[in-house]
Amino acid sequence: MRQNVLEWAALAISAVAIGLVAVLLVVEGLGTMSAADPALTLRPEEGRAVALGWSVPGTMSNTGRDAAEAVVVEASATVDGVEETSEVEVMFLPGGSSVDVEFGFSGQPEGEISARLVGYRVP
Amino acid sequence: MSPEDASDRRSPRESAQNLVRATGGGLLIGLPLLFTQEVWYHGFVLHPLKILFLLGVAFVVVVGYNVTSGFREDGTLFEVLVDSVEAMGLGILVALVALFLLGRLEADMSLREVVGKVALEAIPIAFGASLARSQLASSDDDEDDGGEDGKSIGPFGRLFVAAGGALLFSLNVAPTDEPVMLGIEADWWLLLLLMVASILLTFALVFYADFRGGRPARAGDSPMDHPLSETLAAYAISLGVSVLLFWSFDRTEGTGLRAIVGMTVVLGFVASLGAAVGRLLVGGGEAGAPQGEGAEG
């Protein structure tokens, strides 16, 4: 049997860890599943000049519960009067998670930057 | 408490050594999967209840291994269960810390992703923790805990350990794309040859190669206590474990029967080697048989 306080502590912590993981998996598993829903929030005010032009940061998030794979989004903006598009692919976007991305343009965009989802794979 | 009782008690230092040994063993076994992208990926793609099922299977294997390996030979089933809870708990904690240190857990991740990754990575670490306790203990600890040698676990106990070994080995390969690719691309005759090679190789490893834990190729009393029937049964179990893992990792959904058979035979090769190593680790042959006997027959 457990022979000192360290062994009792190890047992207690182990039991709590297992219980916590099991409960969380059950709660997540029995919760309502919803399809992946990738979204993009651009932050043009944080844009900055980079060696190859202008970089606009953004955050891609998945508000659904299912994961999305190979998510491709496209941002369009006008630079020096010319319409430019920039594409970013995120390999894995788990449900409820987000990842930071950067869109590249040849120069600082004028006006609004629009974005659209090109597509993704359902894992 | 008598002075004898007090001297039999493990000191905190010995318990700490035990925990460090289990952590080290867990990392040794779990390291390949901690560095495998597909496992992180399956942590958030697999249905949480499927991951829980895998954790449950792993717990049964850990309990079975702790029973059959002879660690705490003089202990009760309750003590074995408690040891198994510790091994699984240690697996979860080590996986949590290791994934964090590797930068695989971040604040903006969903709870499902974090729990899924930790739970999947905890499985091989828990196996390693159990192995370390029974196989990597010093001879002093062996004496303290009853040791492992000289305990015959019987043919069905060996098959249980074979299933554990098969699961441990194939778990390192099943989440990756390679067994799927190999299984789909292989010709039928190549798969047949692989089956024959798996059976012959594992037979030779356990009954001919004279490894520590190997046994002479002699038939026992029961039909399952025969080298050929044990080898075939262990191989069948390996194939079953392979199918189970492919199903667990969503590899069978939308996949044709021909492809599933090919994938299973390919992964079965890995699993059958694990099953053989598992049987070698627990031995279970004649207690005190000279090592040279394994080469006979």
Image (spheres, rainbow, N blue to C red):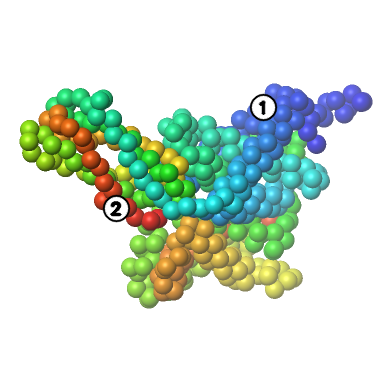
Between B244 and A118, the one nearer to me in the picture: A118
Q: Residue furthest left?
A: A81
- Relative to residue B253, is residue B26 depicted above or below? above
Write the residue at 13% across / 40% down: A84
Which residue was labeled with disc 2?
Answer: A119
- Relative to residue B182, is residue B85 depicted above or below? above
Residue B81 spot, x, y in % from top left = 74, 45
- Relative to residue B251, is residue A15 depicted above or below? above
Determine the secondary structure under disc 2: strand
Quadrant of the image occupied by residue A52: top left
Alpha carbon separation for disc pair 1 and 2: 52 Å
> Could you tell whether B152 is left or right of A82 in the image?
right
Residue B272 spot, x, y in % from top left = 52, 61
Write the residue at 50% across / 33% down: B98
Between B48 and B28, the one nearer to me in the picture: B48
Q: Amino acid at mark 2?
A: Gly
Q: Residue furthest bottom?
A: B189
Q: Amino acid at mark 1?
A: Ala
Between B204 and B26, the one nearer to me in the picture: B26
Write the residue at 44% across / 33% down: B108
Which residue was labeled with disc 1?
Answer: B16
